[in-house]
Amino acid sequence: MSSVLRPILAGGIFLGAYALIATEKLHRTVVALVGAALMLLLGLVSQRDAFCASRSGVDWNTVFLLFGMMVMVGITKRTGVFQWLAIRSAKAARADPMRLLVMLSIVTALLSAFLDNVTTVLLIAPATMLIAEALSVSAVPFLICEILASNIGGTATLIGDPPNIMIAGASGLGFNSFLFHLAPVVIVIFFAYLATVKWLFRGSLSVADDAMERLQRFDERRAITNPWLLRRCLAVLGLTLAGFFLHEPLHLMPATVALAGAALLLVVSRVKIDEVLHEVEWSTLLFFVGLFVMVAGLIHSGIIAAVSHRLLALAGRSTGLTAMALLWGSAAASAVVDNIPFVAAVNPMLVEVGRSLAAPSAGLDAALRSPQMMPLWWSLALGACLGGNGTLIGASANVVVAGLAERNGNPIRFGEYLKYGLPLMIESLAISSAYVYLRYLM
């Protein structure tokens, strides 16, 4: 196949798939699998490259991290702890839906910063849907806000969002660097987000008086149906979360930690494996596989590299223009394709930029962490993580929540999410632009 035809076909398949997902003419998992099959059948990406993470194919770390956490959440759900959490949260908010929305957003953002945003939404979303059911209100506004809050909170730390983990690997920057440089702006963005969502959802969240009174009469202690299993679940979840914190010094990937936790909980819980596997969101996992293969087709056809090179070329030799182009360009790209493969494509180019800036006597490691490179790394991190809020398929957490919501009868429509996600993405990028300029470019 000619070098001219390859990017045309790959781009056409991806844009067609994206249009079908956006219009919801077909289920997104079916579309992703058909698009992946076409990429493979037409030779736009080989099967070896498509299913090899080191060749920009399927990111199995993401897939198995999700699988492991889904298994643990599925077993933990049997204890009734999510019902307990739902009742306690609703009572703490005095059954006021707006106060509850703010509370859940704060919890989601904090947990996303110190765990990761995918794990957080897997734990919070089931409880949220139970709360909404108890209050007889739609769970969709709460779930949309949790998606947004998870991506904002996850931006603040190295372990909060997969793109940050990848950027840390390419740049050599550590946990404290991410916290020092990204947490201040994330705090500002989060408070702006709270003010905005309260305005966006004003008047649309209301609870009948009888529902509020009925909720106050609930005894959350009765929700715990299996204390024996709960103790084991909490112990394994605690060990798993400790593993996430320590995965770097232990030289373990997050997926390894999640799979180990799932395996341990399967052993100590004595729950039948077929019953647990029934709880796994297979549709969501297969969507990710299909999406990764389609993006691999874009990468191997040269489209993503060409766009990224053009982005840096348009910025010229100005660090300020390059930083702004990276911030907004990576956000736009991450809203359309998942931010993980996009960062995988851009990281090597920034390494080359650092190499070109290095003094003859300086090593590459020092050049990658030089003052000239700092605004570029942080712009990429902010753009990729916050850009994931733009659409329903922009980040892993978005797709996971959408899958959970659909399975529980609360489908989130692509266009409905776009009404809230896109404006809030633009708001957060505007704040980020001011921050990068004032802190690094003045």
Image: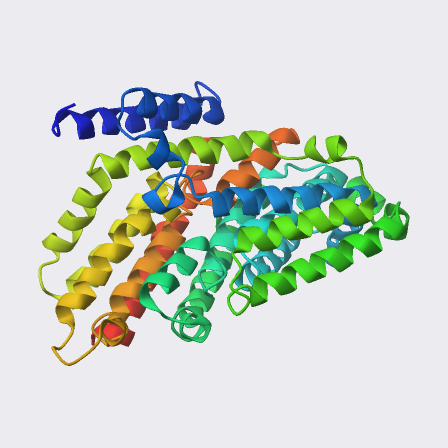
Judging depth in this view, the residue of 37 and 430 nearest the camera is 37
Residue at horizontal 38 percent and vertical 64 percent from the top: 168
Judging depth in this view, the residue of 289 and 190 nearest the camera is 289
Q: Which quadrant, please, contains the C terminus?
A: bottom left
Q: Position of residue 33 (x, y in %)?
A: 43, 24
Q: Which quadrant, please, contains the N terminus?
A: top left
Q: Does residue 325 lie above or below 125 as drawn? A: below
Residue at horizontal 12 percent and vertical 57 percent from the top: 315
Residue at horizontal 23 percent and vertical 42 percent from the top: 304
Visible residue check, residue 207: no
Q: Does residue 224 lie above or below 239 as drawn? A: above
Q: Position of residue 8 (x, y in %)?
A: 18, 26
Judging depth in this view, the residue of 350 and 220 nearest the camera is 350
- Does 109 sit left or right of 349 as displayed? right
Visible residue check, residue 386: yes
Q: Does residue 34 lie above or below 214 as drawn? A: above
